[in-house]
Amino acid sequence: MRKLLFWVLGCFLIMPVNAQEKKDCEPSGFMSAAERNDSKELFKGADFSVTIIGSGNPLYNPERSGPSALVQFNGTTFLVDMGNGTRSQLEKLALTRRYGPDALLITHHHLDHNEEFIPMVHQQLMAGKSFLITGPPPIRKMTDYVVEFYREDLEYRMSNKGQSFDANNMNAVLKELEGDHSFTYKGVQITTTEVPHSIYTLAYRFDANGKSIVISGDLTYSSNLPKLAKGADVLVLDCQVIRKRGNGAQTQSVSRTSAQQGNASRTFRRENLAAAKSRPGNSVHATIEEGARMAAEAEVKTLVITHLPNVEIDQAATKAKIAEQFKGEVIIAGDFLTVSVDGKVFMLK
Ligand SMILES: [Zn+2]
Ligand SMILES: [Zn+2]
C-alpha cells in the first residue's frame, strides 16, 4: 500500500518535470523552425546555395561532422550524403521533422557517406512529408530494408500521433541510378555521372535559373567530372590538402582514405580499385593536382574543397598549389560554411 502511494505521488511529481524537459529539449541558440515562416529564411536571402553540413572524412573528428552537403533552391533542400553527425547538424539548423530535406541523395555506399541514411529515412517517413531518395544500387534494397525492419516501430510512433503508417503508400519517391541521368525534382534539374572511386560512385549537378552547383562524391581524377561540372558556379570537391607542419615552413600532402575499400557493392568496379591501388599512397581520393585540374577543366567559378582530415590544414599552401592550375576562387570547407551561386560566402549559423 505504502509502495503504491509513493508510485502515485511520484507520477504527479514526474509529470510536470517531463513536460518541462520536453520544452527544454528544443534546440536553442539557433533560429528554430517556429521562429521563421519557412526554411528559406534560414539561408539569409541566398536563392540557390550549398551548405557544407559535414566537412570531415571517415575518421571521427569533433571539429568536422561526417561528409554531407545541403543544396538549397528557394527553400527546397537536397541533402547529398549523410555521414556521422548529419542529423545533429540539421537539428542545429532546425531542418528536421516537417522542415526536413526534400530529397536524400547518396553518392556512394561507403559508411562515411550513408551512415545516417536509416535514421534520416525513418525521420522523413515519420514527418509525413513527400521526399525523394536517390543513389546508386542497392539504395532500393536499403530503403526496403529500413521500411521492413522498422515497420512495427513506425506503426507504433505514427499511431501515437493519431496517424497510420502504410508501407505500400509511402511519401517517398525512389530513383536507383547508375551512370548518366537527368531529371527534374521540385524545379531543380538533377544530373548524374559516374566517377572513379573504390566502389560505384555518382557525382551530382543541380541546375536552376541558369545557375549550377556540383557535388563530386569521392573520386580520383575523372574526365567525367569536368564534363558534368562544366561552367558550374560552385563545385564541392573531394580533394586532398596540405598539412601544416612545425612552424608551417614544411608541408606535406594529406591523403585520405583507403580504409573503406572492403565494402564492395553490387556494382563494384574492380578496375577502379585496381587503378586506385596503383596510385601513390593507395589513395582513392583526388590529389591536389587532380582536384585543381578538374576544377580548371570544368571552368567553375568557385571550388570548395571538402572531405577533410583531422589535421591542421595549411590553407595558404593548399590554395597556392591549386592556383598553379585553377584561377577561380578556392575555399577550404568547414561545417555550416555556405556558398551561394552568386558568390556569397557565409556561415549558416
Ligand atoms: Zn568518403
Ligand atoms: Zn568513399
Image (cartoon, rainbow, N blue to C red):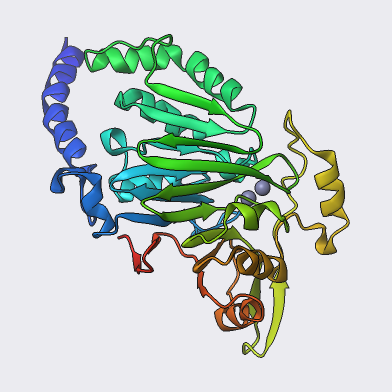
User: Does residue 63 appear anywhere in the picture?
Assistant: no
Please tell me which residue is depicted at 37% across the width and 24% down the height of the picture.
125
**Closer-to-camera residue (59/305):** 305
**Residue at 61% of width from left, 75% of height from top?**
326
Front residue (pair 136, 127): 136
- Give percent across and percent down for residue 149: 52, 16
- Report the side of 166 relative to 283 (left or right): left
Whether residue 321 is situated above or below residue 261 in the rendered picture:
below
Residue at 64% over, 26% down: 138
Split into 4 quadrants, where in the image is the C terminus?
bottom left
Is 340 on the left or on the right of 227, as rendered? left
Q: In x, y percent, where is residue 311?
A: 60, 70
From this viewpoint, is residue 346 visible?
A: yes
Q: Which x, y percent locates residue 167?
A: 42, 11
For this orientation, the residue located farthest to the front is 210
The answer to whether 38 is drawn above or below residue 284 in the figure is: above
Front residue (pair 127, 46): 46
User: Compared to 124, does 330 lie above or below?
Assistant: below
How many numbered discs? 0
Q: Quadrant of residue 177?
A: top right
Q: Is residue 276 left or right of residue 155?
A: right
Where residue 82 sits: x, y (%)?
Answer: 50, 43
Which quadrant of the figure contains the N terminus?
top left
